[in-house]
Amino acid sequence: MVVLDGFPFLIEADESLPSVVQRLWDHELDDTAGTLVLIGSSISMMKEKVMSGGSPLHGRFDTRLRLGELPFDAVSQLLPAYDPDEQVFAWAIFGGTPHYLQAVDDGRSLAANVREAVLSKRGFLHDEPEYVLRTELAEPNRYFAVLRAIAAGETTPNEIAQTAGIGADQISNYLKTLQDLEIVRRRVPVTEDPVNSRRGRYELQDALFRFWFRFVYGHGDRYDRVGADAYERLVEPHLPDFASPTFEELCRRATRELYDDYTFDRIGSWWYQERKVDMVGLTTQSTLVVGECKFTNSPVGYDVLQRLEDDAAEIRWPPRDETEYCLFARSGFRQSLREAATDRDDLRLVSTPEALATLR
């Protein structure tokens, strides 16, 4: 077995390398027991120079393996000293990319890790998203504007185009490129066809990019000016809101284990106009499982259940025979809600540790 790591960098040093490897494979290795592995972290370069139709190596691969992030359960095992809330925050900020996780030492506070690795201009990851974008893209500045718009809460192509100052007829090309790089993803309501739905919303898929475009990009030396407590003053108060989408995703993953009596066809979220349900599970037993996920500092009250019931009633899913309700909460539940859960068979209350335990 021969492994060539950093293959895009080798091509930059010698553009003829793909042709050299192609001749070597065709004339020396193709009919042998040898295995050749080409590894590259630049997705655009690997596509263009290695896998595209114009590459000398096109059509010669037996396997294409695209490595994803480490799952949450693996990351939580790397950070055993952190409590469940801190593990969620760390996952929301650094994600599951091993290179990024090298910056996290659970023997120190999360605040210290974020300050020194990301916020500080001398930090290990302070310029990482910018470096990746400039490596992957020919005109990165336009993409910076697109990503900043999404990080600011714009989710539809028209909203993103207007905020980024890009023509509506061009925005789809930018979004497609960012999707190919797995920096951005498009989501649709769980009840709709991903291909044909016109209610798609875009969000930043990469955790570090989400954090960087929310708190670092465009802020210059703001954190240096504020001083040692910049994290506590400028970042920490907003972290529960920032981490909420990550918590919702973890709760959706936990639902399969929490409701193991059901077989789920799909689990996702649902929205229509101003209505939104964080977790919607479509089962083969015609039961709709719906839930709200609250990563707030305050206990969840009965009003959250009432809104969930109202919104769930608007979900159009004809197979539905009955509905199960589930509430996930970081800070517990008020007495009125606990009493309701005791009296009802269709309501379940799940704490953060309980939800995360199903993922391990």
Image (cartoon, rainbow, N blue to C red):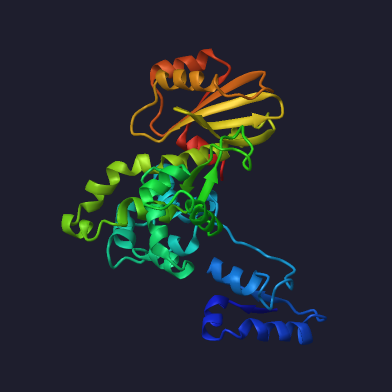
How many marks the image carries: the answer is: 0
Residue 14 picture quarter: bottom right
Quarter of the image that includes the N terminus: bottom right
Q: Which residue is drawn at 55% across and 52% down?
A: 71
Q: Where is residue 258 in the image (x, y as percent from the top left)?
A: 59, 32
Residue at image location 52% in from the left, 12% down from the top: 343
Q: Which residue is drawn at 55% across and 27% down?
A: 290
Left or right of 130 on screen, residue 284 = right
Extreme-top residue of the structure? 343
Whether residue 83 appears in this view of the structure is no
Residue 322, percent from left and from top: 64, 18
Seen from the viewer's position, the closer of residues 268 and 302 is: 268
Quadrant of res 289 = top right
Asked whether the viewer can see residue 178, the reply is: yes
Q: Judge by depth and name the residue closer to the eye, 262 or 134.
A: 134
Image spot of residue 223 (x, y percent): 22, 57
Q: 129 or 223, which is in the foreground?
A: 129
Relative to 134, say whether 349 is above or below: above
